[in-house]
Image: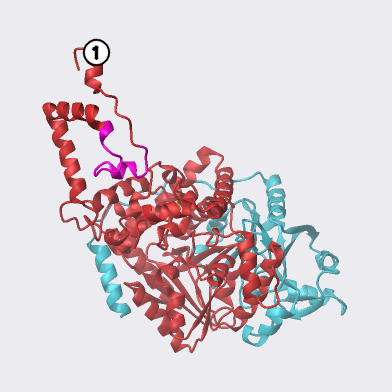
Chain colours: A red, B cyan
Amino acid sequence: MSDFTQRAPIALNDPTLRRNFRRAMDGLMSKRAAQFADPAAWAALRERGAMAKARAVARLPELLEQLEAKCTANGIHVHWAETTAQANAIVLGILQKAGAKKVIKGKSMVSEEMELNHFLEGHGIKAVESDLGEYIIQLAHEAPSHIVMPCIHKNKGEIAQLFADNIDGLGYTEDVDALTAAARRVLRDEFATADAGISGVNVAVAETGTLVLVENEGNGRLSTTLPPLHIALMGIEKLAETLDDVAPLLSLLPRSATGQPITTYVNMITSPRKPGEKDGPQAVHLVLLDSGRSRVYADEQLRDTLRCIRCGACMNHCPVYTRVGGHTYKFVYPGPIGKILTPQLEGLDCAGDQPHASTLCNACVEVCPVKIPLADLLVRLRTESVHSGHSQAVKGAGSRRSLHETLSWRGWQFMYAHPWAYGLATRLMARLGNLIPAKAPLMRQWTSVRTKPKFAGKTLHELARDKGFDHE
Amino acid sequence: MSETARANILGRLRAARRTSIPALPAWDAPAYAVDERIGRFCQLLETLHAEVHRVTEAGWPQQLRTVLAGRAASLMVAPETESGRRLAADWSQDAPRLVPYDRPVEEMKTTLVHGVDAGLTTAVAGIAETGTLVLWPDAAEPRLLSLLPPIHVALVRASTVVDNLPELMRDQGWSSRMPTNVVLVSGPSKTADIEQTLAYGVHGPKELVVLVIED
Ligand code: SF4
């Protein structure tokens, strides 16, 4: 797979993509800022939310057991999957046992990790995305470019064309209400005939065994209410200790994500349909997916990654993400959270470019509602990626170590430890530096993205001596 | 498979070094003066694109009929609820036609998905901080009543409006009595997935009509 630095220029030179992202991100940033206008209130709420998640992470194993016990007592079937392959097999098993041929899906990033739709199609089960953004990219055969707004890379014209090509009887229209109504019509029928609904989970409450889902469209409620069977997918870290923790997290999540004080719907599911109730699924299953998370947990520093509530604020504020968009990262989770999560889940050997795709400007750290020290973790992963020993912290540690870079740093170290070598090298560079071509080895990596500096002709020491300083 | 996976996952998590469990800092959700509360609740709901009417306990069935005139030919109700019974008694035969949600969804799917214009539910509470209705569906009042019909009508008693969610959860002891489903509703169904342009009614109701009963 190509490296991030090779893919970035393609996105940077795509004016439509640049415009689509710029407009969307500017809007999201100003809406978020308006929500947290009072610094004292923001600080207090954020601290409460961050500590709620920090506690949940610190107590993860026992909380998972508590969640399982509570859910089971409430009538929800709990399944555990170490890998995405296992999770897919579990979902398929449940669907086959129920004789399901068609599933309707609410938005779920875990299902993207599993590449569930593709897997189910391969087994003769049709999976229909019902979140409008997800529906659009499913029609376009694309992957989400943002974890909250999956089709943010597309503009009205592109969507209008896609709908005109795919929806019977709908001509080309850029009228957003007409496009939305067309999707409603198509998806209503899919909902009514779906054999099962599949959703993600925003917060699972260990204390009560409640699954909390937030959304604006109502497709999440439909997916979890209308079909006779509901399967919820969640990463093992999406936990809260108590129902009391839900309120601060609910206050932080939509405000950070889209600048809304609350989403239209907050859907709290605690059990399948009880006797006497007229609707709701007869069976609810919860699939707990590990897929590398327990490995993240092993390292006390990297563990903070697992606090994430997937609000997307870090990407909305990232100077890299806002310019190259989500697809440039090539993995399910783009932006700052992706840059720290992906290499840990997939390994530095295949995603080692991710932590380097950052300027370490700290914008993500300032907005993260659960105070994940993203910049520190980026630096830590960069270090791991060139680690010399046999660090077990991250899969593929040391895979980006290169002889050339190691030797350069050794030389640097030697120079700075020996004044005579330093004097010699700087004098040499001052005299000959301007003669070295920009494409020369060692120089090339620097000059590929920057202009080659002009050397002064004399070293700083020489210049200082000329000015009459005789001490260092 | 799931059993081994469970043991392996929990085993790995348990093998990791424990860190100390941080204390939960104090945090208070916003509170409002008594005379501000209802005003804020109604105003926020309107900002969220809901239509709000202040009504009376005695008069709401007739007021609802006026509100729905020309907009809804049929209203689905939960016949075993207090509001369902009130309407059945108050409304005469003419429009809107009352459609009872009185059988399991499997037997009513077509009506629910395509056949009614509006649905009536009663909120157990309102939240002033965010302009939110709290729905607590049960055997008498099904979940889809507030979701499938294009117009959702919600009754809420002014006396049940509280400042914020944590207060409501604590006062009503939610943690020991979570029902099958609780839904917080703040406005009609909406999306901004196409160029951040708001569009209503993408999957759920396009209109939310809130009747605040002054009690
Ligand atoms: S890392 Fe923080 S800002 Fe980024 S998605 Fe997660 S919670 Fe949101």
Q: Quadrant of the N terminus of chain B?
A: bottom left
Considering only vertical position in the picture, is B196 above or below A134? Answer: above
User: Which of these two is toward me, A132 or A64?
Assistant: A132
Position in image of residue A294 (x %, y %): 30, 63
Please give the chain letter of the residue carrying mark 1.
Answer: A
Rendered location of residue B61, percent (x, y) = 81, 68
- Which SS class for mark 1? helix
Residue name at image x 37 percent, y 37 percent: A451
Is B184 placed left or right of B17 in the picture? right
The one nearer the camera, A441 or A403, is: A441
Residue A72 placed where, x, y %?
41, 76
- Residue A443 is one of the magenta-drawn residues: yes
Q: Is residue A430 above or below residue B185?
A: above
Q: Position of residue B95 (x, y in %)?
A: 86, 76
Visible in this render: residue B26? no
- Name the residue: 62% across, 50% down: B129
**Quadrant in the rendering for residue A396:** bottom left
Q: State which quadrant residue A119 falls in.
A: bottom left
Residue at image mark 1: A466
Which quadrant of the view contains residue B120? Answer: bottom right
Given residues A58 and A191, the one toward you in this image is A191
Q: Judge whether residue A95 can be spotted in this image.
A: yes
Which span of residues is magenta-colored? A434-451
Residue flagged by tag 1: what amino acid is it?
Asp
In the picture shown, does residue B30 fall above or below B120? above
